[in-house]
Amino acid sequence: QVHLVESGGGLVQAGGSLRLSCAASVRTFSTYVMGWFRQAPGKEREFVASIKWSGGSTYYADSVKGRFTISRDNAKNMVYLQMNSLKPEDTAVYYCATCQSSRLGSTTYDRQYEYDYWGQGTQVTVSS
């Protein structure tokens, strides 16, 4: 069982920055990919970014590319999302998720069904 806890959300003005953290608490840690998703009010949950635990290759949604950076700390079982140049449309609940094994045919891991465990989310609000 994997328990994920997000933190770092809050209220920020447009153009500002936030850094989200996700702590994974497990007895035996075996992760293939970790990702960030978000869900705005009245909208479906959408992919933000993913990172492979080994090697660190990353993938981003077009809407955040160049503004957000995903990173991980293998020793601490942490994944981060640095969000810069925030826009009001980035307002959402942000969730981290973990995929415990590779998925046949998957490369970017931008689909919710590819993930095994989810955190409870942290609210990010960007004011205009």
Image (cartoon, helix red, strand yellow):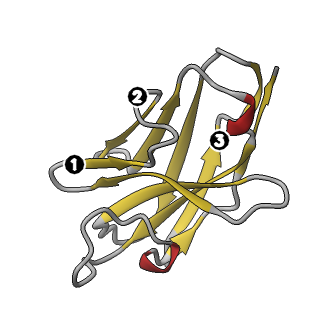
Which quarter of the rendering shows the C terminus? top right
What residue appears at the point 49 percent right and 61 percent down from the top-left corner?
25
What residue appears at the point 47 percent right and 78 percent down from the top-left corner?
116
The amino acid marked with disc number 2 is: Gly
Instruction: Look at the numbered disc 2 and give the secondary structure of its residue.
Output: loop
Residue 90 position (above or below residue 60): above
What residue appears at the point 42 percent right and 36 percent down from the top-left corner?
65
Inter-mark Cα distance, 2 to 1: 15 Å
Alpha-carbon neighbours of circle 3 within 10 Å: few (<14), some, or many (≥20)?
Answer: some
The residue identified by callout 1 is: 57
- Badge 3 vs badge 2, beta-carbon distance below 8 Å: no
The residue identified by callout 2 is: 66
118 relative to 24 in the view: left or right:
right
18 relative to 92 in the view: left or right:
left
Inter-mark Cα distance, 3 to 2: 22 Å
Q: Residue 97 location in percent, x, y?
A: 50, 63
Front of the two marks 2 and 1: 2
What residue appears at the point 44 percent right and 44 percent down from the top-left corner?
62
Front of the two marks 3 and 1: 1
